[in-house]
Amino acid sequence: MIERKILLNLITQTEFLRQIKSEWKPDYVESHTARLISMWCWEYFDKYAKAPVKDIELIYIQKLKAGLDKKLAKEIEEDILPGLSEEYERGEINVTYILEQTRNYFKERQITLHNEALTAMLSKNKIDEAIVEAQNFKIPVSKNEDEIDLSKPEVLLAVDSAFDTTYQNLIEFPGALGDFWNEQMVRGGLIGILAPEKRGKTFLLLEFMMRAYRQKRKVAFFQAGDMTKNQQLTRICIYLAKRSNLEKYCGVRYIPVQDCVKNQNDTCDRKIRECNFGIFNEDDFTIRTKTTFEKLKTAYEENPRYKPCHNCTEWVNSRWGTTWLKKEEIKNPLTAKVAKHYIDKFFIKAKRNIKLSTHVNGTLTISKIKSTLKKWRIEEDFVPDVILIDYGDLIVPELRGEFRHQQNEIWRQFRSISQEEDCLVIVPTQSDSSSYTKDRLLMDNFSEDKRKFGHVTAMYGLNQDVLGREKEIGLMRINKIVIREGDFHHTQEVTVLQRLEIGRPFLGSFY
């Protein structure tokens, strides 16, 4: 099993090849077939400085033409390559974890090879040679990844690793929101989400979970007591079905969709425009910031021929985005029977890993999170790419002393988890009481201890106007509060369309 994993990474992961190159020896691979394919991978890497990935099939064909043993060729073609392809399609590989496993396996193989050599010598009565072999045997110390010698040639591979970020991104959003924060959704990152209560933090975590799932990531979701397991499962099913389980959210619903302010006030004359008339006789600013849900609803009913538009490339980066509506009818509430169909289709049949760990309020600690991750790793070989914790303020402190120091230690531990597990950790946190009277969150809206800003790689705020206009339409403004790398300002924000009644915190976005 482990040799199969090693082979998969040799074929698909450039970073794995870089990291293990100095420690690799062909004898460490026991299977003759795996050893042969691994040599192909190293030949390719030495020539092109990357993993072969799909080119492994071309390499196989070339070796076949060059006279590859037919029995061996049949094994590779019918078992090895198809099986590896299936495993690769299942999703993202945690290179740090497989490197740890590989190095441990190499140590095991060194001991095995040493014992085999001793046994062979003793069987031939080569006592003196066996004594020398035993005295000289020493397992090489694995290189310390925390240390680097800038004067050694190996530093060049380290530079490649530092600049090669193609394997790091774990969650990608489309459109303006993706442009806004995708670069922060990487391995080793700790993302904080700051918001007042009932602002949709858990809904957003669910969106992170589902996007990571669709992008073939392994996800661990720790529920610290904000919701029960049943409530969590219900929300997941509502998300998948886009239908509430409650009668009051059925019937005709108005869902926000993306539009252009130039389309709505009829100031666009582009040929690619979807519509040839406008609906509002107002300036851009008024339409974007003052239009109410009732006004949109009335305009929608009175203008059935109107079509929203965001076709031009300028719309993407310009502040032309605004909201239109589409009408949908939800006939019946979501039932358990229908919900099970979605769970079966999206999770069970897809065979992708998402783990939910739900805890009663006041019981989840950092130690419990770490022990659970260790248990999954040992018992199920489950290593998450993304860890979601709902939410940070419900984690029980294990440090004695002032509460603010306890909170600082909790966030320090969140950061250590992101580094130790080489994964993306996302944790919402509650803002202070003054945030209820603000239209945009600032750095002074932290709760308990401001040092949590120092531990995150990025902190984002969830904002809606205090009068409730944006909430009624289905708008959320997300702004940058802290970004560790790069310029940022709290006024940098993106608007997200959502309809939480159908479980969707993200339906589109614009600047």
Image (cartoon, rainbow, N blue to C red):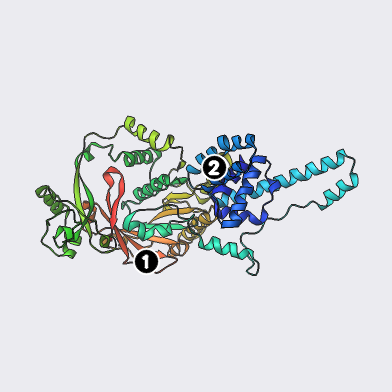
Mark 2 packing: few (<14 Cα in 10 Å), some, or many (20+)? some
| Numbered mark located on residue 455 in the image | none
Q: Is residue 255 above or below residue 333?
A: below
Q: Are marks 1 and 2 in contact (CB under 8 Å)?
A: no
Query: Who's the residue at 46% across and 49% down the image?
Result: 387
* 244 to the left or right of 24: left
426, 258: nearer the viewer: 258
- Quadrant of the image occupied by residue 341: top left
265, 33: nearer the viewer: 33
Residue beneath disc 2: 376
* 190 to the left or right of 152: left
Mark 2: amino acid: Trp
Mark 1: amino acid: Met
Query: Who's the residue at 62% across and 52% down the image?
Result: 42
Question: SS at mark 2?
Answer: helix
Q: Nearer the viewer, mark 1 or mark 2?
A: 2
Mark 1 packing: few (<14 Cα in 10 Å), some, or many (20+)? some
Query: Who's the residue at 59% across and 57% down the image?
Result: 47
Residue beneath disc 1: 443
Provide residue 493's location: percent of width, then percent of height: 31, 62
272, 257: nearer the viewer: 272
**Marked residue nearer the N-terminal end (1 or 2):** 2
Provide residue 294's location: percent of width, then percent of height: 14, 52
Q: Is residue 20 visible?
A: yes
Provide residue 419's location: percent of width, then percent of height: 53, 56
